Structure formats: structure tokens, C-alpha cells
Amino acid sequence: MKVASFTIDHDKLLRGIYVSRKDKVGSEVVTTFDVRFKRPNIEPCMDIAAIHTLEHLMAVYLREDEKWADKIIYVGPMGCRTGMYIIFKGDLSPKDVLEPIANSVKYVIDFEGKIPATTSKECGNYLDHNLNFAKWECKKFYDEVLTNIKDENMIYPN
């Protein structure tokens, strides 16, 4: 099977930050991270409006972060709604990106005000957001996983 993410045993996958794949683009390496907020097929997946809000806020935070902005290629939800894919420039490990990912999650937890890019001109589904649910998902992930992340939360299961 050529789709790498389909070869991971989702029955054993924990919440965490994983290297999904590394690709060469020209002379550079880009690393795709699987930021897994939910245990697949065990926990209920994220609410669509919550993950949509999470996408907007994490993308804004990471693309405006002084240290990481020029390394962010993509921030987007997984179709299964158990996490996010974040693509960074560079040959990176989960430990390398733990800080900016944790900071982006904390940003969502602390966010107040109008969610960025939520007008019909800016977003293809601008009415479908839920800040309270996004905050709840982030707080749970931050408190239970990111504050005490272990190797098993950063290395795909066999």
C-alpha cells in the first residue's frame, strides 16, 4: 500500500505527535506530522465545527510565530477528525516541533474574540465553527498528552 498513514495500526495508536512522512522537495526535506488529539476508534472523533476552528487558530498561530512561520507549509484536519496534519520545512522529529505545537494548542485554549477568517469571503464554510469545543479539545490534549509526552506518544506503534 502506498499511502503510509494506512499502514499504521490505528488500534494501537495513542494520542501524540508522530512523523507521518518525510519527503524531498527539490533539495529540501519536508516533514509531515500527525498531531493526534484522539485515540482512533476508541474516543469519539472531534466535532466538525471544533476541528474547523482548531484549523483556523492553529494555522494563524503557527504562521505568525516568529521562529516557525517560514517553516510552516500546511495545517489541516484529518478526514477521520482525530487530529491534524502539520507540514514543516526541514528534516524534523516530534521533539523538534513539540514547543510550537504545544504553543499553538495553548493559543487556542487562551483565545478570546472573533475567530480569524470567518466571513463568507474568507472561508468556504464560515458558519461552521465552535470555539468552546475547540478549547475543550485542546485543553484535554494539552493537559493529558503534551505536558508529559512520552516516547510512545511520538513513535508509531508496530
Image (tube, rainbow, N blue to C red):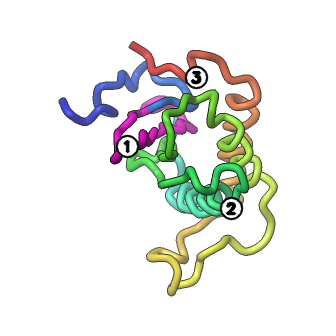
Left-right relation of 136 to 27: right
Query: Which residue: 68% across, 58% down?
Result: 61
> Closer to the N terminus: mark 1 or mark 3?
1
Residue stretch in magenta: 20-42
Query: Which residue: 43% across, 47% down?
Result: 78
Mostly what secondary structure, the magenta segment? strand
Residue 31 in percent (x, y) is at: 46, 39
Q: Compare residues 106 and 74 and report the one nearer the observer.
A: 74
Q: Where, by quadrant of the figure, is residue 145 drawn?
A: top right
Which residue type does callout 2 highlight?
A: Glu
Residue 1 in percent (x, y) is at: 18, 29
Query: Which residue: 68% across, 23% down?
Result: 149
Q: Where, by quadrant of the figure, is residue 9 drawn?
A: top left
Query: Which residue: 65% across, 46% down?
Result: 137
Q: Compare residues 88 and 16 and report the one nearer the observer.
A: 88
Residue 13 in percent (x, y) is at: 46, 23
Q: Circle 2 sits on which residue?
A: 64
